[in-house]
Image (cartoon, rainbow, N blue to C red):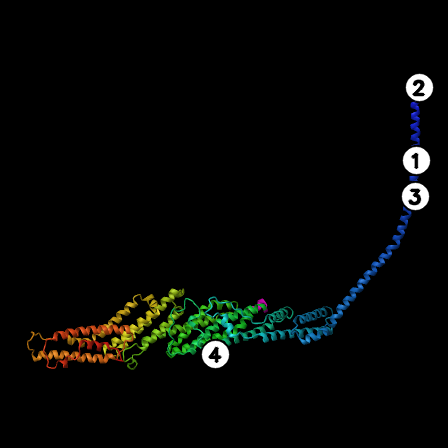
Amino acid sequence: MVHTEDASSRKREIEEKLKQEQETLSFIRENLEKSDQQTKGMVSILSSFESRLMQLENSIIPVHKQTENLQRLQENVDKTLSCMDHVISYYHVAKDTDRIIREGPTGRLDEYLACIAKIQKAVEYFQDNNPDSPELNTVKARFEKGKELLEAEFRSLLTRYSKPVPPILILDAIGVDEELEVQEDVVLEHLPEAVLQDIICIAGWLVEYGRNQDFMNVYFQIRSNQLDRSIKGLKDHFRKNSASSGILYSPAVQTKRKDTPTKKAPKRPGKDDVLDIEIDSYIHCISAFVKLAQSEYALLAEIIPEHHQKKTFDSLIQEALDNLMLEGDNIVSAARRAIMRHDYSAVLTIFPILRHLKMNKSEFDATLQGTAASTKNKLPTLITSMETIGAKALEEFADSIKNDPDKEYNMPKDGTVHELTSNAILFLQQLLDFHETAGAMLASQETSSSASSYTSEFNKRLLSTYICKVLGNLQLNLLSKSKVYEDSALSAIFLHNNYNYTLKSLEKSELIQLVTVTQKKAENSYRELIEQQIQMYQHSWLKVTEHLTSRNMPVFQPGAKLKDKERQVIKDKFKGFNDGLEELCKIQKGWAIPDKEQRDFIRQAQRRVVSEAYRAFLHRCANISFTKNPEKYHKYRPEEVEEMIEKLFDTSA
């Protein structure tokens, strides 16, 4: 029973579930049908939409294409119009630029160049597109006119603003202010900055577009003239100022170099300041040329194209350089004429100039670097001719000292220093101021292999040899001259004075250091010569003192009476001494020994010798009665004899 109930209950459940499933299935079926209907509706709508889109596309595409064509046509029209305007503008260029070109570039260079640029473009257009058109000739003519006015502006600016550099500025630039410890580097501004920029701009245009090199000739001619005028202005300034206020400064102390003398030599004999001014002026002009040429090159480098700079510079400096070299040649010619007149001191003008040229040669060469060989050779040629004429003068001077004639009327009556000696020493002292220059001058004439390397030491030895040669020639000539004197004592005083003057001058001027380079014992030699002459002079007093010797003196006993003959011997001795003393004092009072030290030394030595001999003689005769008139023979007391000798070599006594 139980089982049957369970089975029916189970059956009911199953039927219930089945019913529910069927209901669910029929619900799904209904929904699927609805979904199918909706899908069909959607497909239908989409099909309709697609159909409409196709219709729209078929309508729009032709319109779009048409619009594109219209836009292209519009652009082409715009371009064509623009080209037309551009082309038409070329036909108007001549008219549009007429006023500006006619009025020229002065004061509005940028605007003017922009105007010419338009004309250039027009020329190019017509040459490319319409070479036979009359317009091409018009714009070409306009371009040429514009170029011509630019060239004229270039010349005008350069001419108007190029001024000679004031002398004071040049002197500052070459650094002659010795009070300044450190020389400032003075920049020479030749043109105002704005003007310079315009000139650079025009030059650049003429090179690039003007295909023109004439402006470079214009440039060098104008600047060459200014360079020359600057140097001439300095020369005039020198002459005016030197004439009114003395020499600006001496060539001997121009720069503190090793060739500068330690002691200033005396002025050349017989020469006035005019010559010194000329030398100073020339030396300054050489320095000025170097400094001005350097600044001209710096200016030129900004204006002239690089590959034309050296050639233009070469042309620019020619006039000033030629004038300087001509002046140098004139100095050489003047020296040559002086040598022919035997005026050897005149050749000393060459020394400061030659020294300056050689000291500045390296800077000179550097400044002329890149110029033609003929330009570079000008200074070396001048230096060579100066060295040659200088060496010739030195050689002829040495010969003139050797061959100066012995003329009686030319001999100093008082035996003082001969003019030949003082002139020779003066000349050698001047050489000391320029010892390196003089040494190199002598070396330049050497042809021996040892001279191939001119060292400073070699040059020094040559100069030493030369000075010793002059001194040797002088010594020989003085010896010959001394024989003109009839009195051997005066000859001795003459030689003593000249040798002493020579030695003292050598020592005082430091010439002795140069002499001893080749003659170590020169000082001793001179001292021996001086001593010999003093002894020769003293010899003249023997004829006085010989009367005072014991020779022929009678031998007597005190109180014994002398024989007449013996008394006469003593009388003769007194008389011989008195007469000899008076004669020598009278003669020798008029002789000269300019050196006070030597004069005192010689007088004292003589006084001592004579006084001692006289006192001894008087002592021997003290107790001898040889005359009734002793005052007739015993004329002078020893003190009076000493006073008389003290007045030797003193014309005022």
- Which residue shows up at 90% across the image and 44% down it? 43
| Residue projecting furthest to the left | 560
Judged from the image, the secondary structure of the residue bearing numbered disc 4 is: helix
- Which residue shows up at 28% across the image and 68% down it? 525
Labelled disc at residue 240: 4
Of tags 3 and 4, the one toward the viewer is: 4
Of tags 1 and 4, the one toward the viewer is: 4
* Label 4 Cα crowd, 10 Å radius (few <14 / some 14-19 / many 20+): few
Sequence-wise, the earlier of marks 2 and 1 is 2
**Residue that badge 1 annotates:** 29
Figure quadrant of the N terminus? top right
Foreground residue, 374 or 624? 624
**Residue that badge 3 annotates:** 41
Sequence-wise, the earlier of marks 1 and 4 is 1
Sequence-wise, the earlier of marks 3 and 4 is 3
Distance between mark 1 and mark 3 Cα atoms: 18 Å
Q: Position of residue 444 (x, y in %)?
A: 40, 69
Q: Quadrant of residue 504?
A: bottom left
**Residue type highlighted by circle 4:** Lys
Sequence-wise, the earlier of marks 4 and 2 is 2
Distance between mark 3 and mark 4 Cα atoms: 126 Å
**Residue type highlighted by circle 2:** Thr
Q: Which residues are magenta?
A: 303-309
Distance between mark 2 and mark 1 Cα atoms: 37 Å
Sequence-wise, the earlier of marks 2 and 3 is 2
Judged from the image, the secondary structure of the residue bearing numbered disc 1 is: helix
